[in-house]
Image (tube, helix red, strand yellow):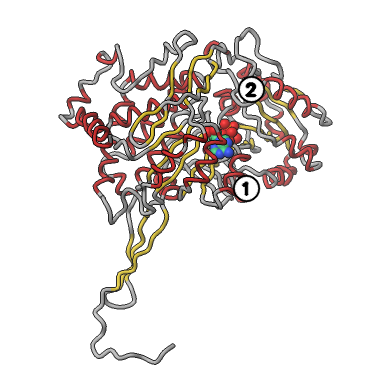
Amino acid sequence: MYRVLASRGLRAKSLFDKSSTSLASFTPSRLNHSLPFATVDAEEISGAHPAEVQSFVQGKWIGSSNYNTLLDPMNGEPFIKVSEVEESGIQPFAESLAQCPKHGLHNPFKSPERYLLYGDISTKAAHMLALPKVADFFTRLIQRVAPKSYQQAAGEVFVTRKFLENFCGDQVRFLARSFAVPGNHLGQQSHGYRWPYGPVTIVTPFNFPLEIPLLQLMGALYMGNKPLLKVDSKVSIVMEQMMRLLHYCGLPVEDVDFINSDGKTMNKILLEANPRMTLFTGSSRVAEKLALDLKGRIRLEDAGFDWKILGPDVQEVDYVAWVCDQDAYACSGQKCSAQSMLFIHENWVKTSLVSKLKELAERRKLEDLTIGPVLTFTTEAMLEHTENLLQIPGSKLLFGGKPLKNHSIPSIYGALEPTAVYVPIEEILKDSKTYELVTKEIFGPFQIVTEYKKDQLPLVLDALERMHAHLTAAVVSNDPIFIQEVIGNSVNGTTYAGLRGRTTGAPQNHWFGPAGDPRGAGIGTPEAIKLVWSCHREIIYDYGPVPQGWEVPPST
Ligand SMILES: NC(=O)c1ccc[n+]([C@@H]2O[C@H](COP(=O)([O-])OP(=O)(O)OC[C@H]3O[C@@H](n4cnc5c(N)ncnc54)[C@H](O)[C@@H]3O)[C@@H](O)[C@H]2O)c1
């Protein structure tokens, strides 16, 4: 079986290997009828034509009789059947991971040609994603399962492509660059190497169905690990199709396993298969549980309660209002980097900023998915949270706070107008119960707005100090002294500073991840890949010669 599958992998690879013309001839017009890797048509998936999602283990696609039937978030039709592995079916996944030694599939001393192989796979996959038909396929597929505007979904595909372009050619081997330091005597030198962990697991959430899993998966592979990937079943169809594209681009079939399961089953695999490293992206609740279960062998990208501070210098009100709207409400607020809390300096309060923000939020509409279903909070839960906040003295609803109208979003999901609640800064800090209520992450189109006077910056900094999650932040000001003070007194891992500062944006060209936690992971850049997916190994060469006339010295 292994041989058959391996040769299938090789056949797929040879489509490219014949000559570079095979890619060139893969033009949009040829793609009009079908994509050579895809098993679904993003447009056709429906209650009448449900799609099926499979898992992949030990080189083959597998189904199961245990289906998780997903409802179309736009109309409630049962439209995707995810064949989920049950606890009784985890053995092949654990066995497959166990086949990979701790020293990985490759490392600087073993199979170095695989660094080049992954440069080639990245080149081919990037070319594929650059084809308009393929980019459109993934954009639409993302939209079907994690409804967001076409532009937002296309942005995810674009970042994924750019990331792959960054690791073409020799760039994968450069990730494993080592260094050497001269030793104490002739023949001695110490060399520092980036070493893989071997068998690893990746667990990712629903909100970026392509970008998060693909970037982490490739990072793990580049450094020589063998990953088992689990994506939230609500959206795993996207990565299932991407796995097929990667196989088409020459990914060896035995290098990655892909599992669909619920959280409990995945937890069991993690305990039984004992991966050497796990990358978890998702809620803090699950992150903390896994950190204990896995005895710390984990890196985390967890909750975001992301803040933006508008500094004392008021400029470009229209632009800043627009960025605030995008940060808080694009993807219906379901970005881990979404603006959760806006601190407005009194100088901005005198401007039309909030009314402009309201206007921009109110032009969002379901038809183009600039506002849409919320996948992990119901409408009732978000309305109840709003009500609780409005009990705080001095608080008020700035806009929103009502369910969306005229839709067929099923009630298991949320449908809320873009919402902003004002809470006075003194009240936010008054007691820990209020603080916790105000800083609860609502993964939907929801933000807290507060104001501060020029002598109240210490209160703002105190509010930041008390937060638990330190993912993204923005200091919107061109005043270097103000920026210095805020940055010097805070910790968020991805912080934008300057008039054009935003909280969202996880492109492939800068680090994205939390700070202030030794378990914190990163995504996107060479530094993130090296930190998350490799450890340091030092080899001290000491060849000699032993000095002439050397004698056994006294013991020490
Ligand atoms: N920091 C980041 O980069 C980042 C990125 C995206 C999302 N997030 C966060 O993710 C959260 C939203 O996602 P969610 O609510 O779907 O997260 P979640 O924690 O419920 O689920 C994330 C993944 O973990 C799996 N899972 C759940 N329980 C598990 C268990 N016991 N063992 C193993 N796997 C388990 C789920 O099936 C899913 O695949 C938000 O808090 C958001 O801020 C963070």
Query: Which residue is at 47% across, 48% downward?
Result: 277
Q: Quadrant of residue 369?
A: top right
Please tell me how crowded label 2 is: few (under 14), some (14-19), or many (20+) other residues with Cα within 10 Å: many
Q: Is residue 23 above or below residue 217?
A: above
Q: Is residue 264 above or below residue 171?
A: above
x, y (%) of residue 302?
57, 40
Residue 500 in the figure: left or right of residue 159: right
> Which residue is nearer to you in this view: 248 or 492?
248
Task: Report the front residue among 67 and 223.
Answer: 67
Residue 548 is drawn in which quadrant?
A: bottom left
User: Are the two marked residues, 2 and 1, in contact with CB atoms closer than 8 angstroms?
Assistant: no
**Quadrant containing the N terminus in the rendered view:** top left
- The amino acid pointed to by label 1 is Ser
Front position in the image: 252 or 520 = 252
Question: Farthest residue toward the front?
Answer: 88
- Residue occupying image coordinates x 62% and y 26%: 444
Q: Which residue is mark 2?
A: 357
The image position of residue 546, as x and y in percent, is 26, 82
The 10 Å Cα crowd at callout 1, few under 14, some 14 to 19, many 20 or more, is: some
Q: Which residue is mark 1?
A: 490
Q: Give the CA distance from mark 2 to mark 1.
A: 26 Å
Q: Earlier in the sequence, mark 2 or mark 1?
A: 2
